Image (cartoon, coloured by chain):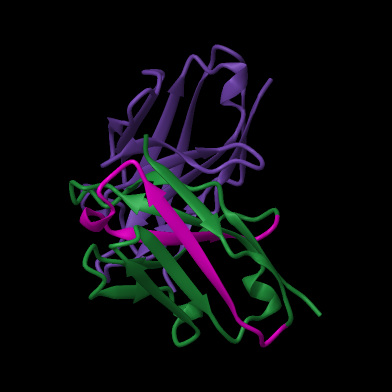
Chain colours: A purple, B green
Amino acid sequence: QTVVTQESSFSVSPGGTVTLTCALGSGSVTTKSYPTWYQQTPGQAPRTLIYNTNSRSSGVPDRFSGAIIGNKAALIITGAQADDESDYYCMLYLNSAIWVFGGGTKLTVL
Amino acid sequence: EVQLVESGGGLVQPGGSLRLSCGASGFTFASYWMHWVRQAPGKGLVWVSRINNEGRSTKYADFVKGRFTLSRDNAKSTLSLQMNSLTAEDTGVYFCARQSWDYLNYFDSWGQGALVTVSS
């Protein structure tokens, strides 16, 4: 079974920069995995932040960006704000035409 | 405005069945691939299944193969997930999601979810 790994938790100071990563257990994440990032707060549906590696979804502030860094997908938050405190999930599209989520990163802003 | 509204969740005994529905509005339902994603209590998101726009092609995660069946009625703009042989591990919130039209393989709209609880 394909495993997608994210940091379980991360902490950032207000105004700081944080990079969350998404690794593929069996190899490298590339643009062909169409990395997507979702933000979710408790009790809410996920919100699409970044799709196709580095495209921002409509209405998403430009402090959120996506990239491939090394062999991982990355979500970079520049100038973190208090309301960025959420769970963040990456999702990859695999060759077998299935989608796999990472385990999620709980981001704390303090 | 795109809207996806799940229904049909509830409490079911182990081994039982449940049928979830997702009503769509605000877009041309027949043009989009659709998915189900679930989330166990306190856990992460897990992809469950997808169906193409015509309803002729489906794909399932290994853990639901042979137990869950995904279908759609484009005339009624409704997506359905028939869940059989349920176990406690199937407990969670089930979200329906719309896949983007541009083959970039991401979900651009989500419902609010339906809670399924499998317990005796």
**Camera-side residue of B89 and A94:** B89
Query: Which quarter shows the C terminus of chain A?
Result: top right
Is B28 contained in the magenta span?
Answer: yes
**Rendered residue at 39%/38% (across/down):** A74
Q: Nearer the viewer, residue B44 or B80?
A: B80
The x, y position of residue B97, in whole percent, is 41, 52
- The picture places residue A90, in percent across and down from the top left corner, at 43, 47
Judge from the rendering whether residue A79 lies leftward or rightward of residue A82; answer left or right: left
Look at the picture and state if B54 lies above or below A84.
Answer: below
The residue positioned farthest toward the left in the image shown: B102
Q: In this view, does A27 lie above or below A49?
A: below
Q: Residue furthest right?
A: B120
Which sits in the foreground, B5 or B37? B5
> What is the magenta range?
B14-41
Could you say which is closer to the camera, residue A71 or residue B26? B26
Residue B108 location (% of width, % of height): 35, 43
> Which residue is painted at 25% across and 48% down in the image?
B28
Quadrant containing the N terminus of chain A in the rendered view: bottom left
Left or right: where A13 falls relative to A16: right
* Residue name at image x 60 percent, y 41 percent: A44
- Does A33 lie within the magenta span? no
